[in-house]
Image: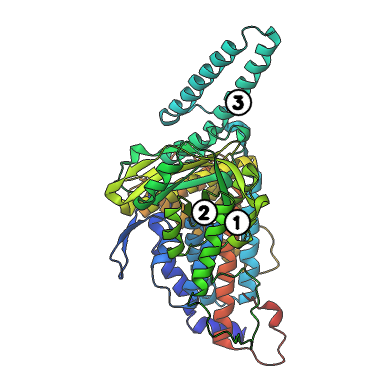
Amino acid sequence: MSGSATVAQRRHIGLQQLEAIAATTHGFLGPNKRPKFMQDEDSRDAVLVSSCSRLLERIELDGSIGQLLHETVQAQQKIFHSGTGTLVFLAGVWSRVALECLNRGITVLDIKTAMRKGLEVCLKVCKQSAVSVEELKEHKPTSAFKSEIQETKLQNMDVKLSQNLKLTLKHSRHFNSHDAQTENTQTALNDVTRIAQAVSHGCDSSMRLVLKACKLQPKNAQNMDIQKLVTCLIPSLSEEKSHVLHGFVTLLSVEQASVVRHLQAQALNIALVNGDLCDKYRHVGFNRLGNVVHITDCADMPSVSLEERWMEDVLRKLHEFSIDVVLVSGMANVKLKDRVFGANVLVIEGVKTSILKEFSICTGAVLVSYITQIDESCVGRGVTLGPWRDFSENDLIMVSIVTAGTSLVTAVICSSVPAKLQSLEDQFWSCAYRLHQALADGKVLRGAGAVELLCIQQLHQSKQTEMENPHEGVVLELMAEAWMDYVSTLMLNSGSVGSKAEAWTAIAHQMRLHINGEAVAQGVDGISVYDNVTVKSEAWRRALDLVFLVLQSDTEIITGVSEGENVYRELMYL
């Protein structure tokens, strides 16, 4: 106990810093986010930030705690594209729980054991309260999503009419098979629309854009392929102009317009480069030979640089195999791009690897690390350039690259406010990943704080059972209060209450109803909102793991670790 007393008497700076940083993001919790304008000191460009991941990217995080939080949030964002607000909030309030426990003289080991049990109780609540997506298919669509279902019906009526005209002279059983297939597709899309509505989290326009993209992936009506989605940002049009297009859509410089015009309405050959398109690039794992000196006895060597010779080789390869389009995952040499303009070859940089793989499958092209490796078998065929649009006021043109059989779909996201584009793109990806995860999980959780209210109930019940650890009840009580803080902030941000005090009163009333044997409300504001099971569970786990890591680090800094002490088994390492 002497060790814990030492810890309690000294300040746990790491936990305090984590709580302070998390407090700055409370406005991002819930559907009605309070965005922040961030300005880059160098470029003076302003960006509207409405998510924890973007905020942490743009603020200066000099300390190790801020960096740990940023890395944890980025790991969550990279996989799920949502749940970061919950993660950061819980990391903050659970840091406060740990600090309070330390002030009461509870040992670090007891704190970790009890909080881990509290998390297990909450995860069990998630598992037991999960709702099958089949139940969501019975929900009536709101006015925002009725148009999507109606549009699907009209499209399928057109398909049926077209099929009937083509099959007039065929046997009636063919009509039946086509009608059944069309009907199944319509039903599947309508079901997806209802699920999308449930997990839209107030971002109706972005989710409708996701649904339109889903309709252009007919093979994946039941579970859209998230890897086949791309975004293209247009800074000069209003948000109502946002739409989806089949194929890979990208923005090019106005100088490339002549090349696009020349290649229009032709069957084109394509090359795919997985890396940078420059003479200095070497693939990952390449080991340069050390202590090697190149010498020659030829005094009349031409004064041509290695870069020039490399460019000549590239141009010869492009001409030899009649390559019209080159997609590059990295950057392209500026001089080479200028040279290929004259040869009417379109070079597009920064293409995601998943897109390169899709073009490889659909065109027969082989991905290469160096353009000079290209031979006849590496060239893909059957690519066309779709209609292009000129945005001369921004020195840009928009062009789509399409090939037969591709499931690639691009969401063209527009805004007349350039600072808002990044936020709209993040909204689109959040909606797409929430819908994708809901279809993959096959179940969802009731949102708007409903599951968290159940967690509060279960934590109160758990502390009333017999416990081996005498401090466990205190820790579980503090975790329940942290959940009450979470739900009250959610209620305040959603506008259902006017203050935190009013929210706490409403939550306490719900708890009294439960004690009296009455059912708890499905959500704090009565709205049919749903969350992803996997996303929420992972956010909770990551938040607690982060708190434990900071708690353990603070403890070792304060108390020290003497040689020979058997404490290493309790340490957590990055």
Mark 1 and mark 2: Cα distance apart in space: 8 Å
Question: Could you say which quadrant of the image residue 60 lies in?
Answer: bottom left
- Residue 317 against residue 266 in the figure, above or below: below
In front of the other: 344 or 140: 344
Q: Quadrant of the C terminus?
A: bottom right
Above-or-below relation of 131 to 351: above
Tag 2 or tag 1, which sits nearer the N-term? 2
Amino acid type of the residue tagged 2 in the rendering: Gly
Give neighbour class at mark 1: few <14, some 14-19, many 20+ (Cα, 10 Å): some
Secondary structure beneath disc 3?
helix
Decide which of 424, 562 is in the foreground and name it: 424
Q: Mark 1 = which residue?
A: 538
Three-letter code, disc 3: Thr
As drawn, is 46 to the left or to the right of 485? left
Q: Which amino acid does label 1 sit on?
A: Glu
Asked if the residues shown at circle 1 and circle 2 are in contact, with their CB atoms under 8 angstroms apart, the answer is yes
Q: Where does the image place residue 27, in percent across and percent down from the top left? A: 38, 56
Rendered image: mark on residue 83: 2
Residue drawn at point x = 46 percent, y = 28 percent: 148
Q: Which colour scheme appears in the figure?
A: rainbow
Q: Nearer the viewer, mark 3 or mark 2?
A: 3
- Which numbered dot is residue 185? 3
Residue 293: image location, x then y, percent: 61, 87
Q: Where is residue 183 in the image (x, y as percent from the top left)?
A: 61, 20
Q: Quadrant of the N terminus?
A: bottom right
Label 2: which secondary element: loop
Crowd class of label 3 (few under 14; some 14 to 19; many from 20; radius 10 Å):
many
Residue in front for this viewpoint, 462 or 355? 355
